Image: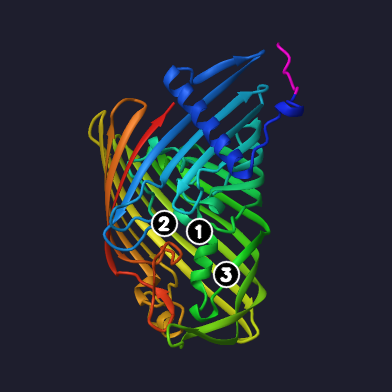
């Protein structure tokens, strides 16, 4: 085995990169690596020394356009190509029981990801037997039927999974957990088979991610909440699935859940301020408000019940999610604000593969930010939203998947939407009124078209 040269450039020949240059260099390196393996046919497995390393990856480019409202990016009107992913993974069997793997990914969806190269997952997987296995590192978090395969675009007909359960804005924190997991497979005779996962560790939240921006939209607008630093606590999650129920091939039911807690350094208006003047002659156009620093605490218990039936080329799935939120925000002007509510989401989906190159699918999905205020009247009266339909989202989706080759696929789908619960005001969904007040500017009924081309190897 050849030795690795660890020598580094020194002196006047050393190249120094700024933060932005380094990020672009990493992205360029990942892209070149992906394209090189994809088009040279070297993907699959390579010999490194005495071992074999499996190499796989994917490249996707999407397009989102809406007639009203911005969905995660600047999609209204001309649409946005800020919807792409590139990933490459390496895995190797170190021994009969131990397997190592890592996947690097670069994502871009509006303000999220920005093509920054990161570790999507990196695990050491140790197998004792069929019913007892351990995994350590950064792995997938148990959430619904499809979180484990969320990155694998080839495994579904739709461009977007139902947002009522698999919200794109929460993908960073729900996607993976840093810690340890135990999992296994238990046949139980004619009754079927059981599989289980137990996860313990930490999830990560980015300060500019969708999770934070959703929280900022959740509290009363008059507070002007801005979160600057988030610190997550230990997460416990798991899933229990029962398949081939009483001998029925393709039938599966599952229950999954996880808890999540976060403290976030936040800034809010403290109730004091001074007049803000402008124009000629000067006239009062608003109030320059002073701010105070506080700590926002969020507790979440998320549970999902799932059903899937797959037979031949037909797949039916339905899932129901309940998110139990508890939020605490100490303030000077309003005392301690404490909110406790349940958000719910559910969907039903059907897909059918007609032949080697065509698969069609549809789903209907509903999401409510508060199951006790589905129409949004209470939230509007309390100043939590500017339009009451910001408290729910109903989505009817039709998808078409075209398999151009075994490695290339193209997808096209339409979404007929009512409500805006999972949109963010920070995606330029606001308007400034004549008195200087900024409020959300959503339309109740809107339509979105999504297209995506993917290559996997």
**Where residue 58 appears, x then y in whole percent?**
45, 32
- Local crowd size for mark 3, using a 10 Å CA cut-off: few (<14), some (14–19), many (≥20): some
Q: Quadrant of the C terminus?
A: top left
Q: Nearer the viewer, residue 222 or 53?
A: 222
Part of the protein shown in magenta: 1-7
Q: Quadrant of the N terminus?
A: top right
Q: In this rendering, would 17 be left or right of 442?
A: right
**Where residue 339 appears, x then y in whole percent?**
56, 77
Of mark 2 and mark 1, the one earlier in the sequence is 2
Tag of residue 210: 1
Which residue is painted at 57% across and 70% down in the image? 226
Q: Quadrant of residue 428?
A: bottom left
**Of all residues shown, which one is farthest toward the top?**
1
Task: In the rendered view, tell whether residue 203 sits above or below residue 52.
Answer: below
For numbered disc 2, what is the local secondary structure?
A: loop
- Local crowd size for mark 1, using a 10 Å CA cut-off: few (<14), some (14–19), many (≥20): many
For numbered disc 3, what is the local secondary structure?
A: strand
Query: Which is the main secondary structure of the residues drawn in magenta?
Result: loop
Is the Cβ of the residue at disc 3 closer than 8 Å to that at disc 2?
no
Query: Which residue was labeled with disc 2?
Result: 72
Instruction: Give the alpha-carbon distance from disc 2 to disc 1, as whole Å.
Output: 9 Å
Which residue is painted at 50% across and 43% down in the image? 115
For numbered disc 1, what is the local secondary structure?
A: helix
Instruction: Give the alpha-carbon distance from disc 3 to disc 2, as whole Å.
Output: 18 Å
Of mark 1 and mark 3, the one earlier in the sequence is 1
In the image, which is nearer the foreground, mark 1 or mark 3? Answer: 3
- Local crowd size for mark 2, using a 10 Å CA cut-off: few (<14), some (14–19), many (≥20): many
Q: Is 2 one of the magenta-colored residues?
A: yes
**Where residue 358 appears, x then y in whole percent?**
24, 34
Of mark 3 and mark 2, the one earlier in the sequence is 2
């Amino acid at each position: 085995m050849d030795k690795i040269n660890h020598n580094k450039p020194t002196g006047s020949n050393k190249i120094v990169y700024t933060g932005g240059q380094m990020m672009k260099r990493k992205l360029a390196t990942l892209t070149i690596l992906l394209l090189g393996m994809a088009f040279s046919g070297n993907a699959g497995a390579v010999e490194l020394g005495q071992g074999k390393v499996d190499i796989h990856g994917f490249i996707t480019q999407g397009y989102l356009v809406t007639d009203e409202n911005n969905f995660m990016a600047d999609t209204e009107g001309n649409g946005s190509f800020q919807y792409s992913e590139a990933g490459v993974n390496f895995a190797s069997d170190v021994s009969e029981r131990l397997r190592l793997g890592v996947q690097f990914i670069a994502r871009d969806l509006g303000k999220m990801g920005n093509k920054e190269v990161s570790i999507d997952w990196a695990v050491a997987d140790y197998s004792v037997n069929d019913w007892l296995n351990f995994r350590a590192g950064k792995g997938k978090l148990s959430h619904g039927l499809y979180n484990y395969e969320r990155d694998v675009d080839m495994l579904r007909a739709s461009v977007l999974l139902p947002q009522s359960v698999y919200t794109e804005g929460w993908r960073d924190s729900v996607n993976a957990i840093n810690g340890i997991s135990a999992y296994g497979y238990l046949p139980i005779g004619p009754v079927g088979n059981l599989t289980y996962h137990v996860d313990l560790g930490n999830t990560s939240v980015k300060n500019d991610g969708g999770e934070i921006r959703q929280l900022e939209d959740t509290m009363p607008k008059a507070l002007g909440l801005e979160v600057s630093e988030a610190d997550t606590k230990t997460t416990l999650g798991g899933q229990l699935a029962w398949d081939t129920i009483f001998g029925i091939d393709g039938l599966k039911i599952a229950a999954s859940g996880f808890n999540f807690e976060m403290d976030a350094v936040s800034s809010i208006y403290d109730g004091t301020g001074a007049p803000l003047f402008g124009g000629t002659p000067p006239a009062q156009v608003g109030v320059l408000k002073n701010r105070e620093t506080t700590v926002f605490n969020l507790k979440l218990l998320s549970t999902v019940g799932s059903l899937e039936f797959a037979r031949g080329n037909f797949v039916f799935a339905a899932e129901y999610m309940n998110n139990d939120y508890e939020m605490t925000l100490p303030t000077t002007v309003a005392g301690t604000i404490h909110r406790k509510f349940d958000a719910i989401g559910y969907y039903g989906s059907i897909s059918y593969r007609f032949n080697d190159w065509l698969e069609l699918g549809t789903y209907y999905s509903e999401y409510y930010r508060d199951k006790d205020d589905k129409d949004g009247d209470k939230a509007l009266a309390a100043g939590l939203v500017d339009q009451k339909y910001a408290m729910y989202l109903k989505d009817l989706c039709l998808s078409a998947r075209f398999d151009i080759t075994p490695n290339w696929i193209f997808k096209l789908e339409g979404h007929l939407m009512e409500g805006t619960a999972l949109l963010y005001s920070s995606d330029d969904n606001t308007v400034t009124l004549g008195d200087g007040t900024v409020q959300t500017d959503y339309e109740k009924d809107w339509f979105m078209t999504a297209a995506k081309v993917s290559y996997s190897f």
